[in-house]
Amino acid sequence: MNRPERKKQEKRLGSQALGPLQQTFAQAVAHHQAGRLQQAADLYQHILTEQPRHADSLHLLGLVAYKTGRLEEAVGLITNAIQQDSTKAPYCFNLGVVLQKQGKLDDAVDAYRRAVKLNPSHLEAQSNLGNVLLEQGKLDQAVAAYQQALRLNPNSAEAHNNLGVALKEQGKFAPAVAAYEQALKLNPHHVEAQNNLGVALRDHGKLDEAVAAFTQTLAMRPGHVKAHYDRAFAYLWQGKLDRAVEELRASAETKQNHGWPMQDTTVSKARMKHDAEQVQHLLDRGLLGQAYKGYLDMLRQLRQRAVQESGSPWRMPVSPGEYQAIAPSFNRILHQADCPSLPGGAVNPSLNVAAIEARYNAKRPEITYVDGLLTEEALRSIHRFCLDSTIWKRDYPNGYLGAFLGDGFACPLLLQIAEELRLKLPGIFHQHKLTQSWAFKYDSALTGLNMHADAAAVNVNFWITPDEANLDPDHGGLVVWDKEAPQDWNFKE
């Protein structure tokens, strides 16, 4: 047998070519299956020292790398395994999983398609292919992939649920509802399908049925964050603003006040500064008790270190002891300011509605600005809510902080403003109702948010910083571009 023939045979034999190392491979697999990943990796490496082309060891070592977060290494190992043996559908499938985790969606699609070609009955590969196509917005292809998965297994509740998601994204509400209902018929405890059913019913205008569906989700899984959040919008669209706020705050309570241990090893420098200033402000106003003085002391220490810390301009490492000192309060909503709805209204009654709508609709793309949009009372109240509420838990590069409706940025006045705008300016908002709201805080010494486009039928920005804090009072703090993002761009683009 010449050298090329011997290499072909070794490639074809895979694990059978191990000889005396076969027992080592079996031990490695046993460690792997038991979750002893380091022991498994050591044995796979030992095998590959002797047999560098052993496809199964390359593949499984790649899975260990994936499991321990070393995604690029995992891609290299599994790709090498495929080069040694291109007939194994599981290799291609797992390569797709890692690539999908990396966000390399085109490459993941290619890997899943190769897996399906090698094994047309590979249900999970077919389903994952649909998931990636759905994420890419290729809805027709996603639907086709899910339908093929259902041909492989008509009793897959997960495939019916996934099909429902794609159909809903296509605007096919009745088929989507039917898909979710079939998923629940097959698996009455499928929480995601139950909640998705509620979303489809809500978005189709069947608000009472949607509320019932979300209520069933919460009966199945109490404290389900998304069910509280989604039920909030059903109540909001019914005009039940107080119930909507209750649901949004229940969502925030579960997300923020969970008491779980903190896992991060770094913190935002800007947040250290912000939180130290905010806690001091609340202590000075008597809105927090003196029990939080120790928390403030640790925040101040971290803030001082942030000033001195080199390395990343936005984040700095923290020790386990430092994290333990701030953990009881860092991700909790320590104070949420009252911000009730206003009986006299929140939107300025003196607005020239006809002129505002005319300016907006005359532009392409539609855009306008309004000074004095809110009443003075509404502006003061929403500003105080943002100043006092410890809801700023999302930190971003460039040193700004954010809060969303489901994170704690929810109050009766905010929802009142949204409804009043919709009703007062029908020539702008038409049938559209509030679907999301958020706020950002910027450090005056940092750069703030980069240029971006928001996905919305109508996007409303409020600038509520007081005039005395603005060095350029003629222009405010927003730069708005009169350019429309292409329809096929996603948010990252």
Image: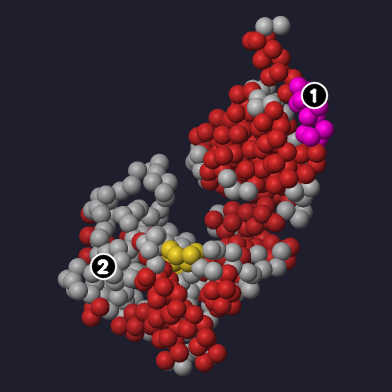
State the image coordinates of residue 227 (x, y, percent, origin top left): 62, 63
| SS assignment for the magenta stretch, majority | helix
Q: Residue furthest top?
A: 1
Residue 3 location, quadrant: top right
The residue under label 1 is 19
State the image coordinates of residue 78 (x, y, percent, origin top left): 62, 33
Instruction: Work out whether residue 461 or residue 468 is closer to the camera in this orientation and state it.
Output: 468
Marks 2/1: CA distance?
71 Å
Instruction: Work out whether residue 457 or residue 455 is closer to the camera in this orientation and state it.
Output: 455
* Three-letter code for the amino acid on which mark 2 is drawn: Gly
Q: Secondary structure at mark 2?
A: loop
Left or right: 90 in relation to 401: right
Left or right: 376 in relation to 63: left
In this picture, is 286 found above or below 411? below
Q: Is residue 157 visible?
A: no
* Three-letter code for the amino acid on which mark 1 is drawn: Gly
Instruction: Work out whether residue 27 or residue 378 is closer to the camera in this orientation and state it.
Output: 27
The residue under label 2 is 477
Instruction: Work out whether residue 441 or residue 295 is closer to the camera in this orientation and state it.
Output: 295
Please check the rendered image and state whether residue 24 is part of the magenta-colored stretch, yes or no: yes
User: Which class describes the residues within 10 Å of circle 1: few (<14), some (14-19), or many (20+)?
Assistant: few
Q: Magenta span covers which residues?
A: 15-26
State the image coordinates of residue 273 (x, y, percent, origin top left): 40, 75
Residue 148 location, quadrant: top right
User: Which class describes the residues within 10 Å of circle 2: few (<14), some (14-19), or many (20+)?
Assistant: few
Which residue is painted at 24% across and 72% down in the image?
371
